[in-house]
Image (spheres, rainbow, N blue to C red):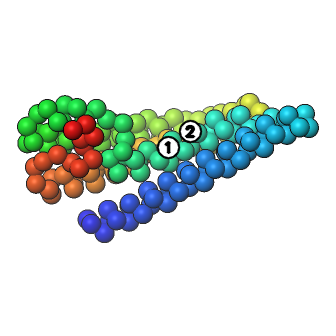
Amino acid sequence: MAKLSDAFGKLLNALAILAALTLLVMVIMVTADILLRNLTRTGFPWSNEVSEYALYVVTLLTAPWLLRRGQHVRIDLVLTLVPVRVAWLMEAASDVLGFVVCLVMLRYGLKMTIDSAMLNSITIKSLVFPEWWLLWPLPACFALLAAAFAFRFDRLIHSEPGRRVEATSVG
């Protein structure tokens, strides 16, 4: 299980690097668009749209990485107030609940993506392309999040009852 977890961590690191590069390209594109519009009265009419899609993709690429690192958004104040064993049980329950929710989202994301592809739905803005191109990253992200929750749970049950290192940023 440790080798599989390490390989999964490397995959998530690669996705985080891809997200960072996507963000860099987006910044360069928006900067170039602004400069061109101000200096030459031209620009990239599609840059706002591509920026929206890039932010969506960056979010989906980094969510599993942040979860694995324990840097996702969480309310950890309660974990500092309850006994260590209760905090450990709460962590276990949240991992199981997170895993189940991700599987539900994966199922509906897949259904949405498949339905969109079967209906030949298209997205029409500045750019025109099949809608499922925008949808498929969603179930992929939730599959990765489900796996991240499973690895978190595995690490938790193989550890001594206590608070996770990343679990308590307040105290």
Mark 1–mark 2 Cα distance, whole angstroms, equals: 6 Å
Residue 159 at x, y percent in the picture: 14, 56
Q: Is disc 2 surrounded by few (<14), some (14 to 19) or many (20+) residues within 10 Å?
A: some
Question: Which residue lies at the image location 14% right of the left edge and 39% below the top edge?
Answer: 87
Quickly name the residue at label 1. Answer: 60
Q: Nearer the viewer, residue 113 or 158?
A: 158
Q: Nearer the viewer, residue 94 or 34?
A: 34
Q: As shown in the figure, which amino acid type bears the numbered disc 2?
A: Tyr
- Circle number at residue 56: 2
Left or right: where 74 falls relative to 123: left
Question: Which residue lies at the image location 56% right of the left edge and 55% below the top edge?
Answer: 18
- Circle number at residue 12: none
Q: Is residue 47 visible?
A: yes
Residue 3 versus residue 61 in the image, above or below: below
Residue 68 at x, y percent in the picture: 34, 51
Left or right: where 81 falls relative to 22: left
Q: Is disc 1 surrounded by few (<14), some (14 to 19) or many (20+) residues within 10 Å?
A: many
Residue 124 versus residue 151 in the image, above or below: above
Circles 1 and 2: CB atoms closer than 8 Å: yes
Question: Which residue lies at the image location 49% right of the left edge and 54% below the top edge?
Answer: 16
Residue 97 at x, y percent in the picture: 25, 37
Q: Nearer the viewer, residue 20 or 171?
A: 171
Q: As shown in the figure, which amino acid type bears the numbered disc 1?
A: Leu
Residue 30 at x, y percent in the picture: 72, 40
Quarter of the figure with residue 98: top left
